Image: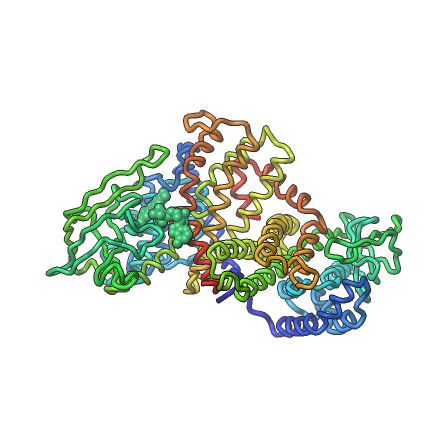
Amino acid sequence: MELTEVGAMLADTAERLFTAHAEEIDRAAHEGVWPEAAWAAIEESGLPLALVPEAQGGFGVPPREALMLIRQSGRHALALPLAETMIGNAALAAAGLSLAKGPVGLADSANARVPWGRHAKTIVLGDDVGVQRHVGLDVSTQGTNIAGHPRDQIAAPAEQPSSAGAVPVLALGALARALQMAGALERVLEMTVEHVSSRVQFGRPLAKFQAIQQELAKLAGEVAAASAAADHAADAYASGAEDLTFAIAVARTRIGEAASKAAAIAHQLHGAIGFTREHALHRFTTALWAWRDEYGTQRHWTLIVGKRALSAGRDGYWPMVVAA
Amino acid sequence: MTTDLRFPTPPSHEGAEALRHEVRDFLANVLVDRSSLRRADSWNGFDRDFSRKLGQRGWLGMTWPKKYGGHERSAYERYVVMEETLAAGAPVASHWIADRQSGPSLLKYGTEAQKEAILPGIAAGETVFCIGMSEPDSGSDLAATRTRATPVDGGWNVTGTKLWTTGAHQADYMILFCRTSGSPADRQAGTSQLLVDLKTTTGITIRPIIDLAGQHHFNEVHFEDAFLPSGALIGSEGAGWEQVMSELAFERSGPERFLSSMQLLIELVGALQDASSEAAELALGRLTAHLVTLRRLSRGVAAMLEAGANPGTHAAIVKDLGATFEQDLPDIARSLIDAEPDAASTSDFVAVLAHITMNAPSFSLRGGTREILRGIIARGLGLR
Ligand SMILES: Cc1cc2nc3c(=O)[nH]c(=O)nc-3n(C[C@H](O)[C@H](O)[C@H](O)COP(=O)(O)OP(=O)(O)OC[C@H]3O[C@@H](n4cnc5c(N)ncnc54)[C@H](O)[C@@H]3O)c2cc1C
């Protein structure tokens, strides 16, 4: 994808920050603390505003390119709510509310399990009615997903009025996870290719065994499919597609399956070293296992696609596929 | 080496959607009496009349130069026509080998005389091609070809046997891949492609081979001192390997690699109208997400072709994912609907299920086996 100047600049900035702070973020995630310096640097860079239209305080990055930043964060298995904050700010802007200061937690209902809830300065709650902006909400129960990222129960006051206009926060969160998974899968493929090329057994690199090559080809197919499905949903967002939620449902259904298959192959080909805390692979695979079911489970999104397919009927099925 | 498997964004073209509706209307009309079972056999449906009608509409040779009977339209418009034709289960056997790979190969490597003589007929839906690559001892290992064309006065003398040649008994021409110099030990070197006029060349015997479902579509083609004129050489002598690899990229890139069992999916959706369950919704959701994604990947390959890029690795990925998708389909269908597959059934679903069950093994053989495709992907990843 050809990037605009501002898009390329943000992508460079993001890459620099994700790399420079990787260790701090990783350590903080393992110890269950907040990486203060890393987040401050990210906030300062303006990345959390990338999806906000220029007129409302953003920098005029085309939305398609802003979404690529979320994918890029997935390539690093970034353990921070950057995607949430980008999407939360976009939802607030769309609802005409003032933008968030600090990290955002996304919720689709008053007692949702909110990623990074305990660290969120602002909770953006969006549903079929509208958007609410909450500051200083308490966390009722702390928890983590299987990647060790905070997933906390919040309790939003039910009577808070919503701004008019529904914003599909659940679907947008799901879009973020789709993009993050596509990014993480790309990295998993790279790591696996690197590993089998350097690991020697029976006197030659694993990569030279046909059984290994065939598994890697399967892995590559899943990664390519995930990448295309993520692009499909991102294009739907950027073009203002009428049926954005369906495009996201399709993407999540396909990418969730790719994540399962790819993680299994990657672990098999890494052997025991990939099964350790020390090796980086687990940061990606545990995140993939968790992300598959966040902002709507695999089952949730698959059922949405299935019901639509069924209701299209025999003669409407193919036209529905083409229009998806 | 590349681990960057991003496929380009599918091109969009003004008018492509209008074209889609034009094609759909046309197909709804022409195919009105075609049964579901016959639609499921789209690949083997041989109907010169239908191909001619497509030609008259300007829907064959769409991207080729006008001077060869083409229409100078975009790869994406061609894609729209192809996918709609396949999704509707139209009989494509009498034009699609020529339109998909033989024509493009001739356009790329053929002599001026060959292009002028052959391409307009393909674009008109008149000229039928078959592919002479496989042999008894040369399947996946194409470079092991034993068929030999020996230079003689004014042309070539060909002896050898081609196998699994789809449509040879109905075709007008074959593009023959064979050895023209050196010895089998030279492998890829010394091979060439030759244009064979099946209607006029003597010394060719075509014998039918019946597939496991009882159908006759592929053949054994035996050459015994068959004489081909010098003008039959396509491209240059000894460049056959490079040419055949380029032809296979055309062969592997299209939507037929996941649409050949579309009719079963359509009938499954139909059958589930009265037999729905959550398991069915989940299964259908999964299949649909696969299909939408495959379409996107495949249109990305069309974009690469349009840009003049070589989509070898990408096409192999689409074909491998597509074949797996298609081969999973019958078992998923069986798990959702009670049926004993039977091609003679009056239920469209049951008849189509029988047909696809019988044909599914070929999906990961024809056009390059699963293992060979995965080898190509592994090479693209830099592993070999
Ligand atoms: C329906 C149908 C139509 C066809 N139409 C045509 C046609 O029109 N023209 C034409 O030329 N051919 C045609 N073919 C032939 C097709 O291209 C071959 O079947 C295919 O290339 C495989 O060759 P083979 O059948 O000899 O199998 P083999 O090459 O003997 O392979 C048998 C098995 O061994 C595996 N294998 C082979 N080599 C390796 C390796 N190096 N590493 C790992 N595994 C390996 C294969 O993947 C396969 O699973 C058609 C085939 C079918 C089924």
Residue at 35% over, 39% down: B45
* Residue B120: x %, y % from top left: 27, 54
Q: In the image, residue B183 lies at what x, y percent?
A: 23, 61
Q: Tell me where residue A130 appears, x and y as whole percent.
A: 78, 51
Q: Residue furthest left?
A: B153
Locate residue A82, reporting x and y percent: 73, 64
Q: Is residue B192 above or below residue A303?
A: below
Q: Is residue A223 left or right of residue B171?
A: right
Location of residue A238 (image quadrant): bottom right
Residue B312 seen from this side: yes
Q: Closer to the camera, A280 or B102?
A: A280
Is residue B54 visible to the viewer in this orientation of the structure?
A: no
Q: Most extreme residue toward the front, as rendered?
A: A202
User: Above or below — where is B195 with respect to B95?
Assistant: below
What colour scheme governs how the chains and residues are painted in the rendered image of this protein?
rainbow
The residue nearer to you, when weighing A179 against A272, is: A272
Q: Observer-nearest residue: B92 or B229?
A: B229
- In this image, A115 relative to A265: left or right? right
* Image quadrant in which you'd find residue B195: bottom left
Classify B292 as above or below B240. Answer: above
Q: Give the residue at x 69% y 54%.
A: A291
Q: How many marks?
A: 0
Residue at point 43% right, 58% down?
A: B376
Q: Tell me what residue is drawn at x 64 percent, y 65 percent.
A: A72
Can you say which quadrant of the picture contains the N terminus of chain A?
bottom right
